[in-house]
Image: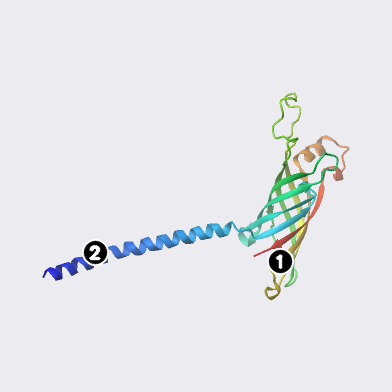
Amino acid sequence: MKWLNFNVRFWVIVFIAFPFAVSARNGYEKRVENYQTAWQKLIPTHYKLQFAGGMGLVSAGIGWDYGKNDQWETDVLLGYLPKYSTNHSKVTLTVKQNFIPWQKRVNEWLSIDPLTCGMYVNTIFDGEFWVSEPDKYPSDYYSFSTKMRFWAFAGQRFTMHIPEEKRFFAKSLTLFYEISSCDLYIVSAFTNSYLKPTDYLRLSFGLKIQLF
């Protein structure tokens, strides 16, 4: 009888505890899956190389595609600015947000983005430039920071899709151009009627390497 009572109690405990054990295991697996998914989202989906555009003579960096049909992109780029009239060359950092409203597929290997637009902010790593006006200048002597610029742009893209059997490391290659202007240039254009579009607009070209 004692043996029977022990078995009954044992199976009652197993019956009660089993759903909680399964739930705990499922919860653990779900947390691991969410953790892996979060890390996977941090993996860059493309590389970019851009010439000009107010972010240096040449800039290179990584980016992420997301949203419905991957119509949003965020890029982080490091740029190189030759010394020109200054004593030394400089490095720039740009964070760029792109929006691609729609894409036109021409054929199986070529597509066109009739319009791309967005904004970006960039800064120069150099002690000669500043965000807040130094004390040596009178108050409001400079109305703009010399270290940071805020840009808006519009352009177009042309993408060559690489067949899966011919891919080495890239899913597609995209050539693009952009016309941009920054906060300082826009204000100057409105307050100085003698300026021409070439004085406040910048043309840039770039290459996007889509990984996946």
Seen from the viewer's position, the closer of residues 209 and 198 is 209
User: Is label 1 in contact with label 2 (beta carbons under 8 Å)?
Assistant: no
Seen from the viewer's position, the closer of residues 10 and 87 is 87
State the image quarter where residue 169 is shown. bottom right
State the image quarter where residue 16 is shown. bottom left
Residue 83: x and y, percent?
82, 43
Above or below, 76 against 16 in this view is: above
The three-letter code of the residue at mark 1 reads Ser
The residue carrying mark 1 is 172
Seen from the viewer's position, the closer of residues 193 and 1 is 1
Residue 26: x and y, percent?
40, 63
Q: Residues within 10 Å of mark 2 (few under 14, many from 20)?
A: few
Earlier residue among tags 1 and 2: 2
Q: Is residue 99 left or right of residue 42?
A: right
Q: CA distance from mark 1 to mark 2?
A: 58 Å
- Residue 96's tag is none
- Residue 13's tag is 2
Which quadrant would the C terminus be assigned to in this image?
bottom right
Q: How many marks?
A: 2
Residue 69: x and y, percent?
63, 62
Q: Is residue 30 left or right of residue 7?
A: right
Which quadrant would the N terminus be assigned to in this image?
bottom left
Q: Secondary structure at mark 2?
A: helix
Q: Residues within 10 Å of mark 1 (few under 14, many from 20)?
A: many
Above or below, 162 against 204 in this view is: below
The three-letter code of the residue at mark 2 reads Ile
Residue 137: x and y, percent?
75, 25
Q: Residue at x 74, y 45 (%)?
A: 91
